[in-house]
Amino acid sequence: MKAFVVFCLIFSLVPFCYCYKDDWEVVSKSNPHKMLNFRVALKVRNVDELQRIVDDITNPYSENFREYKTMEELTKIIAPTEKEQLEVIEYFYDRNIFEVNSYGDFIEVSASIAQLESSGVFGIEENSFFTYSHNEKAGNFVDRSNSEIIIPEELKHIVNFVSGVANFPFINSRKTPIKHLKRSTDSILREDDPFTVPQTIRNMYNIPSDLYGKNETNSQAVVEFSTSAGISESDLITFNNITGGLSNQSLSYTVGPFKTDPLNPVNGESTLDVEYIMSIGGNISTSFWVVDGWIYDFTTLVQTRQQNNKPVPYVFSISYGWAEDEQCQITGQGTSCKTLGGTSQDYVDATNVNFMKLAGTGLSIFIASGDAGAATKKNLLCLRPFEPIRPDYPAAAPYVTAVGATMFNGGGNSFPQSNSSLPSFCQQEKCASSGDPVVCSIPEALITSGGGFSNYAPRLSFTNNAVQSWNSSGALQPESKYFNQSGRAYPDISALGHKYLIVEGGNNEGVDGTSCSTPVVAGMFSLINDVLLNNGRKPVGFINQALYAMPSTNFNDITVGNNTGTEETIPFYHCHTEGYGAAVGYDPVTGFGTPNFQNILNYYMGPN
């Protein structure tokens, strides 16, 4: 089938403000009997002690390497006292709300809208709840209060913020360009570029063509943020057929408001994630998580499932992000942090602690580094001269693995189409076989790989040598006033992110993005987990300390390119601003480069 190469326009007429609440329209007054579930984030303590323990568990030179803890053990270290937790619980009990459960560092509450409006908890006013419908995503409804969240004086010493009452869930749409994915245009250069397919990945990164999952306990997942999301099973079957993938693959289970055929419209982002994590991490139990909220809500969802002994995968792939210092614009849908009762830094700090706990339980969380270079999507048109760059979140979180994107210089080489052993698609269309990888960036690609330094989270000590080496390498750097040189540097690793073949709505399409590279890297480490588990060893868990300790031969170093570009928002319009340059060894553009799968596997199978 001829591949259709299409373009998806992502553009706002007001480049300085994405007014997300305009994406939602009031449908009606909320049903007073409807139940609402929400979370109250509590202020934590002893974070230094938690970090010491997690760093020891994830240190390849420690005798405690991969001796993971339970979520209960880790939460007990940082949770407020039982007396303080009881203060919050009694606050609800006094207002006749009794479905209240403490998970240590947050409280989960379930109450009817009538109860919330009549009780006045956290400043919720009567008749303040409405059912909203999303303007662009048909079938997405949510009930939210238009009241501002007010933390009462008697709880300010313990309550951090409230999520799920007045803040809206994230919905991926044309007005909210968060998902790190772009569809390829029909420009001559991109039309001539060969497609990236699973065979490209295995060939480039030294993954045996016959290596698939065998261990029944192994698991991986992709995460989407919406009030509903899903995949087309028919597209997945077609993709596997035309790329030579395993024909019997399907999702093992789903979490949250999941949809399957018929989907209208088909969710291309979900399609990409599932098709590539399951093609690289083939025959490994794969789940699909839909989070009706944002990234803090994801971390608490994982924690509740762990503490309730529900299935949680070893590996997560997440391809979403937004400017680190504007998390309230995501959680508040363009309104202020008053929808949370806290600040963006409160939100980031609490989520970072949760990521640290998840690392200590043995989970690997891979996050896309962003598609708009160092500028992030807050400066797509390079119109912010006084704030040209800023970090992307959650890629800038210290206890996740951020994944950047590369491309082949000049498009790369192609497999010979006359080779009858190739999958059917590659006998009709050009599929990339190899090439010289460089930083994925405009104008050759539709996106520029994100990277930079956190303004909130300090750099972890095990990264110091690598980052300081880059700092003294002479590579391109922004003016020092524009970035926090002592902050957490990202990404950590990269993979190809240009012109991936996906099957969406029955059509073959090419897409660009760190949304491509992230599920691929996640699938690779799921394969490594499979080999480890089959040999009686524990999964890799949080890999960053090991990555920074590995020999350089475990990576294909990317030394050409920079992330001064943004992404192609207006067709064929490109702009550049401040950014970072690639260098020998680590750099905040592609991390350590792309993985050599076999060498990394040998590292984990060694005596470390």
Image: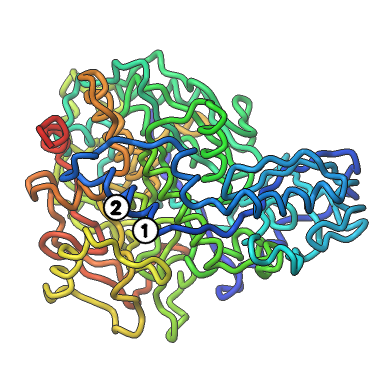
- The image position of residue 365, as x and y in percent, is 38, 43
Looking at the image, residue 462 sits to the left or right of residue 185; the answer is left
Looking at the image, residue 457 sits to the left or right of residue 336; the answer is left
Q: How is the image coloured?
A: rainbow
Question: Secondary structure under badge 2?
Answer: strand
Q: Residue furthest front?
A: 83
* Residue occupying image coordinates x 19% and y 23%: 209
Q: Amino acid at mark 1?
A: Ile
Where residue 499 is drawn, which disc sits there?
Answer: none
Mark 2 surroundings within 10 Å by alpha-carbon count, few (fewer than 14), some (14 through 19), many (20 or more): many
Say if mark 1 contacts mark 2, CB within 8 Å. yes
- The image position of residue 135, as x and y in percent, is 72, 52
Residue under label 2: 405
The quarter in which the C terminus is drawn is top left
Residue under label 1: 447
Comparing 495 with 305, the one in front is: 305
Mark 1–mark 2 distance (CA, rounded to whole Å): 9 Å
